[in-house]
Amino acid sequence: MIDTALVILMAAAAFLLGACPFSLWIGRAKLRRDIRDFGDGNPGATNVFKAGGRMWGVIALTADMLKGMPFILISEYLLGYAQPIGYIIAVCAVIGHAYSPFLGFRGGKALAVFGGTLLALGRWDIIICLVILFFIGFLFINNDAWTVMCGMAGTLVYLSLTGADTWEIAYVAVITAILLMKHFQGLKTSSGTSGRLLSWIRSRGKIA
């Protein structure tokens, strides 16, 4: 039997843990820099790398992924709740990261914490699909925002065609909407027509 009060408590805790800006804190403590002064200005792990800390960037990325996992694992493996509860908790963790109350309800772009929730949920099919689509997008699209959104849209198509669970499709659809809002400014820029792969081939040709 599901304890509604406990589920609400875990969802709130997942939101608050997701809202913890570990990347920003690592940048301040270890790099002595505000990572929002770099890259796209977001308090995410990518800008820890851009601030000059490869090792700390990896640690920040890992922390952002891990913070999406604990309460999903507690829900499913300790309490034995059905997966729909896990999806609800996962959404709360992602929203916490994307709209952190510790940062005036601004936050990172939420891809890392989203990845962490997928690991906790055991959705390897979605992870593999996203990795493949993101890699293809990386090769043929110049704009990262377009790469992310094309990958998410492609994953929704894949889930629909393979008859995935309604909760699974709904979860990815909600995250897609959140990512759309977080990448909206980047989507205003053209996706580019040459792509990184073609640009690399051309550059190699010039060198040769």
Image (cartoon, rainbow, N blue to C red):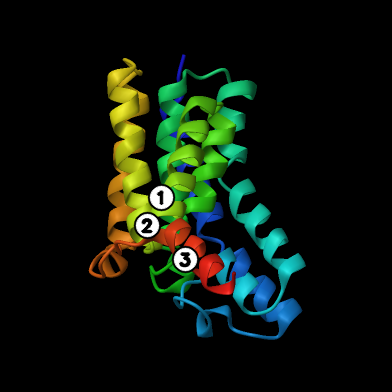
- Identify residue for label 1: 137
Name the residue located 34 percent from the left edge and 25 percent from the top edge: 159
Name the residue located 35 percent from the left edge and 42 percent from the top edge: 152
Rendered image: mark on residue 141: 2
* Residue 186 position by quadrant: bottom left
Q: Compared with residue 69, is residue 185 higher up or lower down, i.e. above or below?
A: below
Name the residue located 53 percent from the left edge and 39 percent from the top edge: 117
Q: Residue furthest left?
A: 188
The mark nearer the N terminus, 3 or 2, is 2
* Residue 27 position by quadrant: bottom right
Q: Are marks 2 and 1 in contact (CB under 8 Å)?
A: yes
- Identify residue for label 3: 202
SS type, badge 1: helix
Closer to the camera, 155 or 8? 155
- Residue 151 in percent (x, y) is at 37, 44
The mark nearer the N terminus, 1 or 3, is 1
User: Label 3: few (<14), some or many (≥20) within 10 Å?
Assistant: few
Q: Compared with residue 35, is residue 202 higher up or lower down, i.e. above or below?
A: above
* Residue 141 position by quadrant: bottom left
- Residue 15 in percent (x, y) is at 47, 50
Task: Specify the amino acid type for callout 3.
Answer: Arg
Task: Specify the amino acid type for callout 1.
Answer: Gly
SS type, badge 3: helix
